[in-house]
Image (cartoon, rainbow, N blue to C red):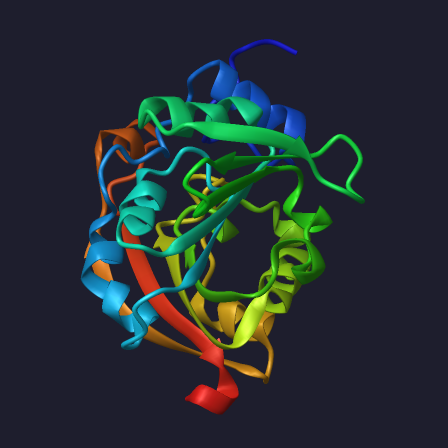
Amino acid sequence: MSNSIEFNEKKQDRVLSDDDWKQIWEARNIGFHEKNIHPLLSEFLNEMQDGRPKLNIFFPFCGKAVDMKWLADMGHNVVGVDVCEMALKEFFTDHNIPYTQEAIAGIPGAKVFKSVSGNIALYCCSIYDLSHSVTGKFDGIWDRAAMVAVNLKDQERYVNVLLSLMAKDCRCLLVTVEYDPNLIKGPPFYIPEFDLENLLGPSYTFKHLKKIDALGDLQKQWGLDIYFENIYLIMPKMLS
């Protein structure tokens, strides 16, 4: 396999494997990585917190998201998962955070990297190998580039894992993308609102919080002239 995999191509109608994602990081084709705190997270963090001062917050497909340090510095506990060890290690080195490494019982070949301070744990494994018996359940979830990166055939499986990790009062902030799906196939994949409703099922509710114009040079390179991000608040229905 060459090192020419791009995060998005007009011709791609393919399924990305874990090895593909590792290669994307190794080739530094990581235009999806945000170097700054995501503006939608900073704007709507209060929706996740709901007055709670200290949360257990989950980052699916976390990469080396700078948002994790921002939340940890506030006193929250942060747990992330990604298949790419390089990305997880770079998170700690980029921020000069001392960390330890250990194997994960029950998940062959998996590792967890933990900050010495104790409030950041990043799991190097497939998200489908995680369960609440390993990580505990979460008060908050920040999904900025995870669901939209999941292979279409795996989206229901992904959502089921995400929902299984939610505590009864969990509040998840989900960012989806919107563009003309006739121009590119993804990832990131376009998830219409009615598909999101079907994926969540009857036990969960969602509320659209905001839509922003997120068209940048990267999206223009893909051949797009319209590209939006939508943020939703997802909660167990009993809280709605």
**166, above or below 98, in the image:** below
* Residue sitting farthest toward the top: 2
The image position of residue 81, as x and y in percent, is: 55, 43
Camera sees residue 9: no
Classify the position of the N terminus by image quarter.
top right
Q: How many marks?
A: 0
**90, above or below 138, in the image:** above
Where, by quadrant of the figure, is residue 192 drawn? Answer: bottom left
The reply, left or right, for residue 214 in relation to residue 82 is: left
The image position of residue 216, as x and y in percent, is: 22, 36
- Residue at figure coordinates x 33%, y 69% from the top left: 48
**210, above or below 35, in the image:** below
The image position of residue 40, as x and y in percent, is: 24, 56
Classify the position of the C terminus by image quarter.
bottom left
The image position of residue 96, as x and y in percent, is: 33, 24
Where, by quadrant of the figure, is residue 30 drawn? Answer: top left
- In-front residue for pair 193/36: 36
* Residue sitting farthest toward the front: 117
Camera sees residue 235: yes
The reply, left or right, for residue 172 in relation to residue 66 is: right
- In-front residue for pair 97/143: 97
